[in-house]
Image: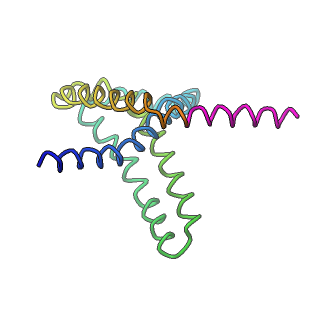
Amino acid sequence: MRILKKLLSILGMALLVPVLLFEEWGWEPMARAMARLARLRLWARIEAALRALPPWGAVLAFFVPVLLLLPVKLFGLFLLGEGHAMSALLLLLTAKLLGTAILAWLFQLVEPALMRIPWFARYYPRWKRWKDEVLTRVRQSRPWHIVQYLKERTRRGWRRLRKG
């Protein structure tokens, strides 16, 4: 039983870590990009309305982008089934990036309201702590350091090539 639990834990981490890394990589820059839109008067009004939502209204606000992107993602799966792999991949990747940007932006606006929901206030800090621990372990791993080294060498090589 102990071995099975360990195997399931490893499998869960292998599936979850790429998602966590993507979300972590994109969350802050995408939220900043969305926040730049606040310079627009209409966008600023939308943000003010979202900040004023009651706790359960904030929860519902998260379902709007999910529901709006669901048909797009289903269409991407349809394209995949019809043999249009590249179009499907581009559509699904764009939907993921857009969805992450919107959710990052939304979360920053409605987090105070969400923290007034007792179960959210109790479990969100635990989730955040666990996620941060997992990402810290990943960033301390040898594969992570190798990828970072290769990324930096590629970046330097690209700069030299462009100047050259």
Q: Between residues 31 and 10, which one lies in front from this camera angle?
A: 10
On-image quarter of the C terminus: top right
Magenta region includes residue 18: no
Picture quadrant of residue 48: top left
Image x and y of residue 12, in percent: 29, 47
* 162 shown above or below 6: above
Instruction: In this rendered view, identify the residue nearer to me: 117 or 51.
Output: 117
Vertical arrangement, residue 83 with respect to residue 49, above or below: below
Residue 42 is at least partly visible in this image: no
User: At 68% across and 33% down in the image, what residue appears?
Assistant: 153
Between 49 and 135, the one lying in front of the other is 135
Q: Residue at x 37, y 30 (%)?
A: 137
Q: Is residue 54 left or right of residue 45?
A: left
Q: Evaluate whether residue 15 shows in this view.
A: yes
Point 34% across, 32% down: residue: 134
Q: Nearer the viewer, residue 16 or 40?
A: 16
Check the image and report above or below for 94 versus 86.
above
* In magenta stretch: residue 159: yes
Q: Main secondary structure of the magenta part?
A: helix
Residue 119 position within the rendered picture, expressed as x and y whole percent measured from the top left = 16, 31
User: Magenta stretch?
Assistant: 147-164
- Could you tell me which residue is drawn at 18 percent across and 26 percent down? 122
Image location of residue 60, percent across then percent down:
29, 42
Instruction: Determine whether, in the image, residue 80 is placed left or right of residue 53.
Output: right
Residue positioned most to the right:
164
- Direction bottom: furthest residue: 82
